[in-house]
Image (cartoon, coloured by chain):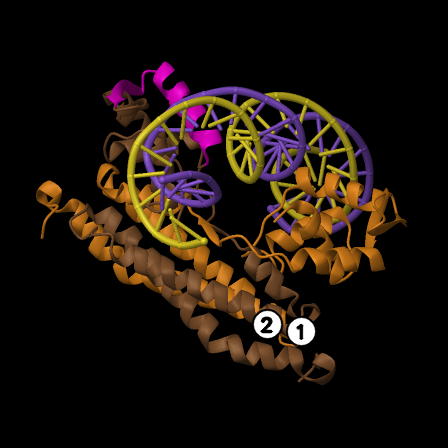
Chain colours: A orange, B brown, C purple, D yellow
Amino acid sequence: MDARTLCLGVLARGDASGYEIKKSFEEGPFAHIQAASFGSIYPALTRLSEDGLLACRAEPQDKRPDKKVYSITPAGRDALAARLMKAPADDRLSSDFLFILFFAHILPPPLLAEFIDQRIAWYEASLERMKGCGCAARPPGERFVHGFGLAWYTTAVRYLREHRDALLADVSAPANLVAE
Amino acid sequence: MDARTLCLGVLARGDASGYEIKKSFEEGPFAHIQAASFGSIYPALTRLSEDGLLACRAEPQDKRPDKKVYSITPAGRDALAARLMKAPADDRLSSDFLFILFFAHILPPPLLAEFIDQRIAWYEASLERMKGCGCAARPPGERFVHGFGLAWYTTAVRYLREHRDALLADVSAPANLVAE
DNA sequence: TCCAGCATATATCAGTCGAGAATATGTCGA
DNA sequence: TCGACATATTCTCGACTGATATATGCTGGA
């Protein structure tokens, strides 16, 4: 999904600055499904404003640079709706962690254990953060996506916990027998 | 994960051409965890060969351009192992589908139903493809990653099936009540 | 039978993206 | 007081994606 559509989507939920949009991809409701960096958000906001899809107002702040707050315009809502009706691309998990585990047999077992334990902790922390998001009072689509994320993280934690010890035992076994 | 490491990883499992490497990210054992396009694979192979991490031989073929088959060198294996020992970045799901569903209330319900049904079919097809991969005789790391993929796809299908009707009912409900 | 479309196979390129650093400034705890 | 962290925005540079170009063989449907 391109950065412009992503920004329109965030702003459809309420006004925000570039900084706040970035946060909504790091900790907010989109954290588990999409990502965007400053390098794509700021140019996108500039471009969307030029195209009349966003309005921008500068909010003066005490002893800080002005906060540029963006709002979606009616034309912006139309553009978002049009873009959302296009068939979505395939879902894709990008996991350096699993790529590394693929080659578990060439890694030192203690490092392997460390990587797995860190990842379990990371998935559990993500789960806790999501559980406290208070999205029960949000539209049905948001609740659906939130539930999907919960299901995904829960499955990941359970799988890692249940298979951790067996993997460590297998890679340490003499000769790493390939056929069983 | 950068394209060079990805190529080294694929070639650590056996010799392959650029085309075959691409396929292993589309249908092969890495399909559910990483992606790479021709535009990143070919430059990566050239660069890795220059650095002595790969060897390349041209296999003549009947009435086709020569097939350039790459093999990993001992230096390549060392470089791969070194790269795999670095702490992995966070796992990230990239899903245009879920981003669209987030805004379910502004989409026409029939389109919404179509998107969900297509995604269920896609996850089920991926699941079938993965089940027939014959990875039982592969190293423990590969089996672990394969099992993770299976668990993920299974959870996704179950979640979509179980919540599909409720979402469609909610978005069609009068006034899309926000508080319940 | 013929032809479109797909699979094999390699490669390039324009445009886009993203990680990280640079730049400011205020706050909060040690 | 001093460093670490949070807010807020911008820019650069290397990397990546998607599209396109170039060849050729095979296969299935009209």
Number of the label disc, if any, that sits on residue A143: 2
Same-chain check, marks 2 and 1: yes
* Residue B71 x %, y %: 26, 24
Inspect the magenta stretch and tell me whether residue B50 lies in it: yes
Work out whether residue B94 or residue A70 is closer to the camera in this orientation and state it.
B94
**Splitting the image into 4 quarters, where does residue A87 fall?**
bottom right
Secondary element under disc 1, as helix, strand or loop, is loop
Residue designated by label 1: A139
Please give the range of residues in magenta: B37-61
Residue A180's place in the image compared with B26, above or below, is: below
* Amino acid of disc 2: Arg
Instruction: Pinpoint residue A61: horizontal percent, then vertical percent.
Output: 87, 48
Q: Nearer the viewer, residue A62 or A45?
A: A45
Instruction: Provide residue A34's location: percent of width, then percent of height.
Output: 58, 52
Asked whether residue A18 is in view, the answer is yes
Secondary structure at badge 2 equals helix
Rendering quarter of residue B177: bottom right
Left or right: B7 in relation to C29: left
Q: Are marks 2 and 1 in contact (CB under 8 Å)?
A: yes
**Could you say which disc has been placed on residue B73 in the image?**
none
Q: Position of residue D7 (x, y in %)?
A: 75, 48
Residue at point 29%, 53% (across, down): B146
Q: Is residue B136 left or right of residue D6?
A: left
Q: Is residue B80 above or below residue B172?
A: above
Point 38% across, 34% down: residue = B6
Which residue lies at the image location 20% right of the left edge and 56% below the top edge? A166
